[in-house]
Image: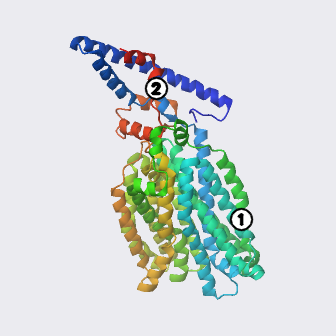
Amino acid sequence: MKNKKSHSSSQGNESLKKESNSSLLDRESDNKRATHIKQTNTTNSKQSNQPSGQVKRHNQSSLNSWYKRLHLSDVTVVEKSTLQRAIAGTVVGNFMEWYDVGVYGYLAVTIGTVFLSDASATMQRLFSLGVFAVTFIARPLGGIVLGQLGDKVGRQKILAFTLLSMSAATLLIGLLPGYATIGFWAPVALIVLKLAQGFSTGGEYAGASTMVTEYAPDRHRGFFASLLDVGSYLGFAFGAGLVSLIELNISPEAMTAWGWRLPFILALPLAGIAVYFRTKVEDTPAFQQAQSNALPQATTEPKGLSSLIHGYGKELLLAFILVAAANTLGYTLTTYMPTYLTTTLHHSMAQANLLTLPILIIVAICIPFTGALSDKIGRKKILCMGALAGLVFAIPAFKLLENDTSVSTFSGLLILAIPVIFFVANLASSLPALFPTASRYGGMGLSYNLAVAIFGGTAPLIMEALVSVTGSDIAPAYWIMLTSACGLVAVLFLKESARKPMPGTLPTVSSQQEARDLIATQDENPDWDVNVIIHDAEENGTRQAPKHTEKPDVVELNQQ
C-alpha cells in the first residue's frame, strides 16, 4: 500500500517517490491557487482602499476555504497485494470461529455423553447446550474489552490475539480427558475453555470487519467486506461436514471414544495457516494516520464504555437491531434447522445434514455477489430487501418445511436463505460505517456481540419453546417476522454508506489514476460532501491540515 509508511527500503523508496510526485502536483496546484488569491485580494484592496488588517483577515478566510479541499496526499492508495493479504488475514479468522461452531453444534450429543457420562440422556443434552450458551455469555465482555483495546493499540495486535486464543481453546477441548477419567473436573474444564473461547470470539468479527472496511477501496467496500461472511458460512459447513464424514466412517462407539476429538485437534494446522496470513497484515492506514498525527481534536473521541454509549447511543442501537434481525435468521439456518428437521419434523440426522449443508454453500456463493450489488445500488436497499424478505417469506418457508418430501424441505430452506443472504452480505460493510475511526472497533465490539448473545445464541431455544408452547410447527416463523420488522425500522434510520469514506476516514482507492480522478472531480461527486469528510478526518486525527509555513506563496500572502 502506498502511504507514508512501508515494509521495506525498496517499497519505502517507491512510496517516497510517488508521494513526492503527489506533493509536486499538490504544490503546483497550491501555488496557482495561492497566486490567484493573492492577485484577487490585491485588486480588491486597491479598489476598496481597505486597511491592511482587513485585507489580512480576508486573505486568511480565503486560505481557510482553500484548506477545506482534498489533495492527492489525502487519498490512500491500496495495492492489490496488500488488500489480498488483508482479506486473507481477516477471512481465515471468521472461518476458524464458525468452524468451531459447526463442529461443536454437530457433536453436541457426543460431547454431553463424554463430559457427563453418569447423567441421564436429557441432562447430557441440556449440559451440552448450556455449555454452548456459555460462549455467548462471554462474547459481549470480550467485545467490550478487546474492542476498546483495538481502538487504542491497533486492530492487528488484537486480531492476532483473538485468533491464537480461539485456536488454542479449540485444540485443548480436543485434548481434554472425559468424565470417566477425571470426573467432575472434566465438565468444569470444558466450561472454562468455552468461556475463554467466547471471550476471544467477541473481538474477532468486530475487529475483522473494522480492518477489512478500513483497507477496502470505498467504491468496492461492500464486496470485499462481504467476503468475511463467506468465510463464516464456509467454516461452518466445513466443520459440520467434517463431523458428518467422520460419523459415516467409524462406529458410534469409536466416535464416543476418540473420533469426536479429531475435528478439534484439526484446529491446530488450520490455526497455523490462519496465523501466517494474519501476521502478514499491518494495521490499517486510517489507524496509523490517527496514531501518527495525534491531533488534539482526536483526544476528544470517546474512549471508555460509558463515553462510547453516551457519544454513539443511536449508532449502537441501530447496529444492535440490525445484528439481532440478521442473526435470528442466520442462526435459524445454521444451528436450529438441523435440530428442527430431526426433532420436530422427524427427519434422520443424515438426511438433515444432506439438506442443510448444500444450502450453506449456496449462501456462501451468493454473499459476495450481493455485497458487490450493494456497491452499485446502496446498502440500505439491500438491507430493506432482507428485512422485507424475512417478513414475507418466513411463513411460506416453514409451510414448505412441514411437507414430508426432500424437495419441499430443500425449497423451504432455500427460501429461508434469501433474507439471510441480503442481511449477512451487508453487515460487515454497514456496521463499521456507523462509527468514526477512533471508536469503530469498540462500537462494533459492543453492539455486535450483545445482539449475537441475546438473539443469535437464544434463537434455537426461543424457537423450540415456541413450537412446544403453541403446538405449531410454523411458530418459529413469527419470531423471524418480528425481528425482521424491527430490522426494517432500523434500516429506515440508517445513513447510506456506499461509495463514500467512512466517518473519520479519508478516501481509499485502488490506483493512482483513480486517486487523481477523484481529486479532479471531488466537487461533482454526488455520493459525498467534501467538507464533512475533511471535518470528520480532522476530528479523528486521520488528516492534518498543511502548515502555512510549508507554502512560500501562502506565507507571502499572509504577510501583506
Please give the name of the residue rendered at 76% of the width and 79% of the height, measured from the top-left corner: 182
Which residue occupies the foreground of this view, 74 or 299?
Answer: 299
Nearer the observer: mark 2 or 1; the answer is 2
Contact, CB < 8 Å: mark 2 with mark 1? Answer: no
Secondary element at tag 1? helix
Which residue occupies the foreground of this view, 403 or 222?
Answer: 222
Which residue occupies the extreme left position in the image? 48
| Residue 37 visible to an observer of this rendering | yes
The quarter of the picture where the C terminus appears is: top left
Q: CA distance from mark 2 to mark 1?
A: 54 Å
The residue to which callout 1 is attached is 171
| Residue 227 visible to an observer of this rendering | no
- Image-quadrant location for residue 241: bottom right
Which disc is residue 547 wearing?
Answer: 2
Vertical arrangement, residue 264 with respect to residue 79, above or below? below
Vertical arrangement, residue 55 with respect to residue 511, above or below? above
The amino acid on which the numbered mark 1 sits, given as a three-letter code, is Leu
The amino acid on which the numbered mark 2 sits, given as a three-letter code, is Lys
Pointer 2 local density, CA inside 10 Å: few below 14, some 14–19, many at least 20: few
Vertical arrangement, residue 434 with respect to residue 345, above or below? above
Please give the name of the residue rendered at 47% of the width and 55% of the height, measured from the top-left corner: 443
